Image: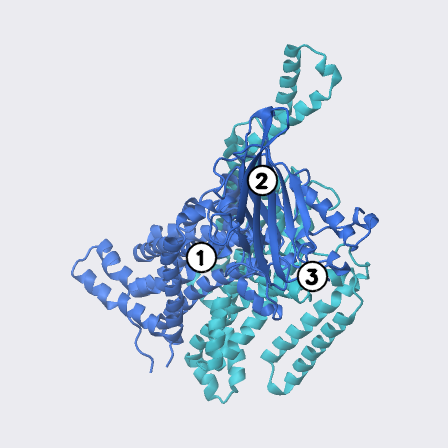
Amino acid sequence: MGVVRHLAKRALFLTITFILAIYATVVIANGGGVIDKLLKDQIQFELRQRYANDQHYRQLPPEKQQEIFNTTYNATIEARGLNEPFVAKSFRYTIDALQFKLGLAINLHTSDGSRDVGAIIFERLPRTLVLFTVANIVAAVFGIWLGLWMARKALSPFDRGLTVLSVTTFIVPPWVYGILFILLFGFTWRIFPTAGWVSAPPPPQGPITDALPPVIAMGMLFGGFFFNSYVRAKYRRIGYAVMLGGLAVAAAWLIMPYDYYKDIEWHMVLPAIAVAFSIFGSWSYTTRNLVLQVMDEDFVFAARAKGLKERDVLNKYVLRAASPPIVTSLALTLVAAWTGAIITETVFNYPGLGQLFFVAISNFDAPVVVGLTTIYALLLVLTVFGLDLTYSLLDPRIKAMRR
Amino acid sequence: MAAPVPIGLKAALLDAVRTKSGMVGTGMLGFLILLAILVPVFAPYDVIKAWGGTDAWQDNPKLAAPEWSEVFSGGKHLPRTIFLTPAGTPGGFLKFRTTENVSDGKGNWNNFTFLGLKKTFGFQADDFPSEMTVYLNTMFTQAGNLSKPPAISVIFQRPDNKNLTLLDDTPRLSTTDINRFPNTKSNAYAVSQPIKDTPSYKILDNLREWLIANNVTTRAEAYDPQFYVQPEVLLFAQLDRSMLSKSTAHVLKGDYSLRIELVGFENTDDANARGIVFGTVFGLAGTDDARHDLLVGLLWGAPVALAFGTAGALVVVLIQMILGAISGWYGGAVDELVQRAADFYLIIPTLPILILISLLYRPSIVAILFILVAFGIVGSTTKVVRSIVLQVKEEQFIEAARSYGAKKTRILFRYILPRVMPYTFALIALTVPAFIFLEASLSFLGLGDPVLPTWGHTLGLAYNNGALFYGFWWWIVFPVVGIIFATIAFALLGYAFDKVLNPRLREQ
């Protein structure tokens, strides 16, 4: 029961945090009334323009004109709900946001013209999710593998060099690498497309199965890697074969005809590399340190005494014991990636959530900003809750502590 | 065997600096600090205040690569900027002036001034200049309808003697201070890229006629709307059909002259001139599209980044440390409150809210710092310090202090905080880059301080002006190198502290 109560307490706390974060966003996004003033000015301007072209209106005496103008203006303000006091309005906006009634955007729209904020966000959400999830997985797998290797060769020149590399690379955010990579791989060597999501004009539409090879290749590579981590030496040949197969699929994908889906995936390579490059260091450094710490524990000593191979000791005993802190690290890098996406996507002109956020604030499109922050906050809260859940499952000490 | 973990503040500092990464990090940081001290001396803040204007930079070439990049151009000698200094300065224009009074035979005397300005300059580079501009100061009677502006012609003499008249004009502006450059009353003639409906625009037609006269092109072709005249190429190219395109044209090396002839209608008329043949390379770090010397901006980025990063990191980490220590030391309701606040701060999307605030209120760099501190009162450091305090709490020297009746606050500030202090060094060193990058991110989006040319600001301008697309690499690479250099210095220091204070990572 302890776990359930613990989780229930966390859920309650996270819900309160979520509500507060959204209220803060609503207050800031409306600039304490700044946006309202902008909107009122805009309405006034539009009305003036409309009446300036109205011959009938222009023939009326000035007092009559003013009266008609004021009536229409007040009616419009009333209809848009702009005359309420700011505090009341902010509560109304917050409740709307919490119910995901995100409303209509002021300027922005989806590619097929809908101004519904929900539609705008969900058009872009999958792109960001795919890009950052793939980049995070690649960085995590590569980083853990590297960290294990560094721990095995601790204090050698190889370990020292890679430690310094890890420490220095993960501190630089992905968009800085992004700019350099665009300059080098995009414009100087012309290997990858430099920006965007598809080429303009887009290449011919192929069957959706064309999108699969990279997914399969990645699955085979990681599958083989994990398989090999947990099986005995004589079965590892299978894992290597699977990984080789993955490489073959990747190679085959490279020579496949260049169609719409391949184009999209090809556009995602450079941003994904930039994101992965700025994350892997934190993985390898954390893994190395944790593994070195766990390595001194008695149960590892016992495993060694049993005569197990060093590699099995690492993969089965050390890594498993070190995994809860590693999961924390995963969640926190994911959280950082969500918010960091704003500038990374702007640099790559990648039409995901981050770029949408920047376009929205540049256009003073308050409904989109509030909607996006709601989604961001929700994603963060869900990530943290997922972390709590995983922790309570992975770490027996939490159960014991809370009982 | 591993040495014991250093306990004192000073011991930890010394130990960390003595490690290899600590030494490198300290060296890099020392270099940055030296730069931060020297830059305001050599390039005073006035330079930065003039950054937004154009006057201070108009003598620099536009978008010029660094001079040393010549090494990669395959042995080419790239053109530097050539200044044709005004008459009266050493090596300046040669000036000849005479006046003459001519009678029209009916008792009216007409007063004439004849004036010639000539400057010869050698052009030995393997590439064409990027631009050419002539400034002319003239003095004449200027009184509405009774104005008597002189007639001038600007003649360009080439080494092959295929000379041409660039333009004939009557200047509109008169100045009494003809020898002063820059002068708000200078008549500026942009020889390259002349603007339509300015006197310089005649240059394009004069060049067409010159090409036709020299049988390079036909009249029909020269006046075709598709025909593109590039004065800075045509003037300095060998005279044949290849000169019509910059990619095929060959540079004509030798001595060129710029001659300005003036006929004035008063005895008092006078003139002086100044010319600039802009090069394609400039200085150590090149220039941007507003002709800024990027070196100045880059160097000024160091003190700004250092001050911003260190101030922010110090304040935030110290506040978080004290709150974490209080939380761990007092426990109970205080602990619960601080920990929940830390969770809350970790969850709210800081960067989006920060961008929002920056856009709506356009804060200065100091205000941004305050906002960042407000968003960092509690955070991950609070949690780390709390866990350390929970361990320290059980140690014997605390028990000893308690036993002789020390107050709780006294124990916290005199015994616990000094013990925790060394651990925060690593955190401070690793937080500084975070602050530098936050500022850079905001500046990159154009939301940073509107005046200061920070690294992020320069980078944002470069990105938005298509530096990547056009290959103005110097505009991108140097700010990035600056940011990465500064952050690596702090990362190495942080790593050194981590290594000294975390016994399991220590070298044996």
Q: Chain of mark 3?
A: A
* Circles 2 and 3 in contact, beta carbons < 8 Å: no
Gap between marks 3 and 1 measured at Cα: 33 Å
Say which of marks 3 and 1 sits in front: 1
Q: Which chain is blue?
A: B
Q: Nearer the viewer, residue A98 or A139?
A: A139
**Disc 2 packing (10 Å; few <14; some 14–19; many ≥20):** many
Say what amino acid the circle numbered 1 marks. Leu
The colour chain A appears in is cyan
Q: Chain of mark 1?
A: B
Say which of marks 2 and 3 sits in front: 2
**Disc 1 packing (10 Å; few <14; some 14–19; many ≥20):** many
Gap between marks 2 and 3 measured at Cα: 62 Å
List the single residue furthest toward the front.
Answer: B105
Residue where numbered disc 2 is placed: B114
Q: Quadrant of residue A219?
A: bottom right
Residue B45, position as x, y percentages in the image: 40, 48
Residue where numbered disc 3 is placed: A193
> Please, what secondary structure does the residue beneath circle 1 have?
helix
Q: Quadrant of residue B151?
A: top right
Image quadrant containing the C terminus of chain A: bottom left
| Relative side of B128 to B489, left or right | right
Q: Quadrant of residue B158?
A: bottom right
Circle on res. B299: 1
- Residue at 54% across / 83% down in the picture? A312
Up-down relation of residue A226 to residue B452 (above or below): below
**Disc 3 packing (10 Å; few <14; some 14–19; many ≥20):** many
Say what amino acid the circle numbered 3 marks. Pro
